Image (tube, grey):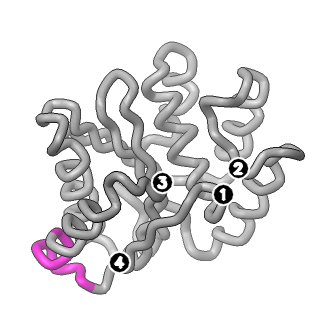
């Protein structure tokens, strides 16, 4: 389960199935976590994107993420029709957040699903009684902590030793 009173950062992955990865970071750790992730951005990079890193950099990034102790839940919507996968994952995420006192949800901006996200989140927060949940969309270069779900979703979908390396962060996998 996602940590209580956390800020939750969300990214999706479509390779080999549809996953929404939610990484919870405690408010008291946000400044340190942002600084640590920003410190990994190389000259010429605007952001970290796990797909574009080499294996040595991936290991370095995962070492830093390990020090941040995020609580990660993965929502697998692969069983749904392609048009409903994201909606199912977001509904599952909001249902879980409703059982915590999480106040902030940050999703990576994807212009193609922005309207869908807003409709789903509006409806789902009301359905689950967590209207106080604030949700925002940011581009990955605007919110460095979006690198956490990006990295862990990549590891999960890549499989093998990468999936094994990331499993310590994952507190739950939910088929929605």
Circle 1: is it few (<14), some (14-19), or many (20+) Cα within 10 Å? some
Mark 1 vs 4, N-terminal side: 4
Relative image position of residue 132 (x, y in whole percent) = 30, 86
**Residue of label 4:** 101
Mark 3 vs 1, N-terminal side: 3
**Residue of label 1:** 141
Relative image position of residue 134 (x, y in whole percent) = 38, 79
Q: Which residues are magenta?
A: 124-131
Taking the image as shown, residue 84 lies to the left or right of residue 153, namely left
Residue at image point 71% right, 71% down: 31
Mark 2 vs 1, N-terminal side: 2
Mark 2 lies on a secondary structure that is: loop
- Is residue 172 among the parts visible in the rendering? no
Query: For residue 58, what is the image quadrant?
Result: top right
Query: For residue 63, what is the image quadrant?
Result: top right
Whether tag 2 and tag 1 are in contact, CB under 8 A, the answer is: yes
**Residue of label 2:** 47
Which is more foreground, mark 3 or mark 1? Answer: 1
Whether tag 3 and tag 4 are in contact, CB under 8 A, the answer is: no
Mark 2 vs 3, N-terminal side: 3
Residue 23, numbered circle: 3
């Amino acid at each position: 389960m996602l940590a209580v009173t956390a800020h939750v950062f969300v990214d999706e992955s479509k390779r080999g199935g549809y996953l929404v990865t939610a990484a919870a970071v405690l408010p008291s750790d946000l400044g340190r976590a942002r600084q640590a992730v920003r410190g990994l951005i190389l000259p010429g990079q605007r952001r970290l994107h796990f797909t574009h890193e080499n294996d040595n950099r991936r290991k370095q990034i995962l070492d830093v993420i390990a020090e941040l102790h995020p609580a990660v839940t993965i929502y697998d919507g692969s069983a749904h029709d392609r048009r409903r996968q994201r909606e199912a994952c977001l509904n599952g995420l909001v249902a879980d957040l409703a059982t915590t006192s999480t106040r902030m949800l940050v999703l990576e901006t994807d212009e193609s699903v922005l309207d869908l996200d807003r409709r789903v989140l509006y409806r789902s927060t009301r359905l689950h009684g967590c209207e106080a949940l604030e949700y925002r969309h940011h581009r990955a270069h605007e919110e460095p902590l979006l690198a956490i779900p990006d990295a862990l979703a990549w590891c999960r979908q890549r499989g093998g030793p990468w999936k094994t390396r990331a499993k310590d962060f994952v507190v739950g996998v939910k088929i929605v």
